[in-house]
Image: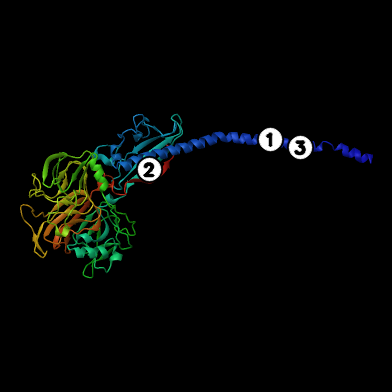
Amino acid sequence: MIATRLALRAERGFSMFLVIMAMLLTSMFIAAGFAAANGDLPISGVSKDRKITYAAAEAGLNFYLNHLQQDNDYWTKCDQVPAPNASENNPVNQQVDPGQPDTRRWRNLPGSAASQYTIELLHTKNYTKCETDPKKQDSIVDLATGTFKVRVTGRPTATSKQRRSIVATFRRKGFLNFIYFTDFETLDPQALSSKSARDTAQANCGDKYRSERAGNGCTEIQFVTGDELKGPVHTNDDNLLLCGSPVFGRSDRIDTVEVSDGAPGYVKNGSSCSATPTINTPTGKFSVNSAAMNMPTSNDQLSDVAENGGLSYSGKTIVRLKTGGLMDVTNYATGSPVTQTNVAWPLNGVLYVKNNGACTGEYPTAAKYTESVTCGNVYVSGTYSTSMTIAAANDVIIRPTSGGLLSNKSDDASITRQSTSDATLGLIANNFVRVAHMVTRESDGDCIGNVDTTNDPIVRNITIDAAILSLQHSFIVDNYECGRLGTLSVNGAIAQKYRGPVGTGSGANPSTGFLKDYEYDDRFRYRSPPYFLNPIDSAWDVIRSHEQVPAR
């Protein structure tokens, strides 16, 4: 018994040793954890700065995109854009190439006391900087694709060497990307002659694509041999209707011909027609199953623009464009014509014609140009050298100014750009954009033929240098089913809800109206008339971006 008690007494304190060892190990773990955490603090700081730096670059990209969407020609000013406010730098710079002094201007992020961004406009390979000269816009824009690039660099503080750069490519996608755009490839129901025909067509054909209106007796419009669409084409309709061998695209451009349905993208107009289009572009085929682009419904917001820095008229208005930023204008707001000569171009580039009460307008197939003077119609012709958008609450009508329309009379119905000018012109109608063609008819409405008078001379060939937009109806030739005219040449872009006919017949010698010769103005890939895109859900956007490593 004694021996046993001595053995137990000898083991006293063993548990204390275990406790001490456990505490030692715990303290070592704590020390190691502290050391590890303390060592991560610099890494966490660097990671935080990297995130802040990238966020600053993204903010700079959004700054430029926002200004570009407010002003589609913002890029044309290069680095000569205004500063955000009186106390901050303009952060838009010319590209700083390797070996050049870094003179970039930086801007602090709003609400941030430290992080900054700077923006560089990346010039094309044949230039050393972005040029503001309108004739050198290829200094920044790739004319083949209509794209340009910027590089945006962020930093966490003004003294930090940390940098992150984003290179972004901009392109505009919209109606101005095409020489020819339609929502529906059928005759506008409101272009028919009688009320009963209009009502029937509206019910059976209006707002319906080809497959939906098949068998409804709708008037379908075809492209024929002799028609040429020299540029990109898009229709929201299922396909294009052909008779013969029309030409689409240009041999020296990649011009898409986009349709919404499947291959081949076109159909022939009956068994008596062939359908052998020439796709005169390196792509060599129709682009099928293309996404639809929705038409806007009104240009009313341009009325507000015209009343705040532009020119606003009420009722029937006739405009004869002149070079040197001038025009002659006759307006019927008082009921009688009042003419002003050498009117200065609107400061913001927008002229708008409003309705002046109830409008009893005319239909294109019965046009006599005797509509109520209260209608918001604008008649246009002449030569321009300064950019402008002319918009109407009702119709835009392209017509000579002879026959008492203006004191400055002309038999020339064309709208042309002065050859030495880089100006752009937009024509936007809520309803029709019409090419005037006065004819004589019998009492039952049947066509007799062209009128050849002092007031309305026969205009055999017409040229229109403009971007044309008919929001609710068509670009159309008045009385197109009467009289043989010549060639209608459009150098620009055409967008319309319904297909507007310009003549009748088939082959290279149609029975009446004009042959089409439409050629795309490539400047509209990246330029637009003043405020032209405001009524359209279309603007510059970033089509791709990537981080440049190492940063600049």
Q: Are marks 3 and 2 in contact (CB under 8 Å)?
A: no
Helix, strand, or loop for circle 3? helix
Q: Nearer the viewer, residue 235 or 481?
A: 481
Residue at the location (40% across, 44% down)?
545
Few, some or many residues within 10 Å of mark 2 (<14, 14–19, 20+): some
Q: Looking at the image, which residue is at 57% across and 36% down?
A: 40
Instruction: Specify which label sits upstream in the sequence, 2 or 1.
Output: 1
Q: Position of residue 31 (x, y in %)?
A: 66, 34
Quarter of the image where one finds residue 216: bottom left
Residue 493 seen in render: no
The residue singled out by tag 3 in the image is 19
Whether residue 49 is visible here, answered yes or no, is yes
The amino acid pointed to by label 2 is: Ala
Q: Is residue 165 left or right of residue 80?
A: right
Please identify, in this view, whether the residue under mark 3 or under mark 2 is nearer the observer: 3
The reply to whether dot 2 and dot 1 touch (C-beta < 8 Å) is: no
Q: Which residue is mark 2?
A: 168
Where residue 456 appears, as percent x and y from the top left, is: 8, 53
Lower sequence index among marks 1 and 3: 3
The three-letter amino acid code for the residue at tag 1 is Met
Give neighbour class at mark 1: few <14, some 14-19, many 20+ (Cα, 10 Å).
Answer: few
Q: Position of residue 384 (x, y in %)?
A: 17, 43
Residue beneath disc 1: 28
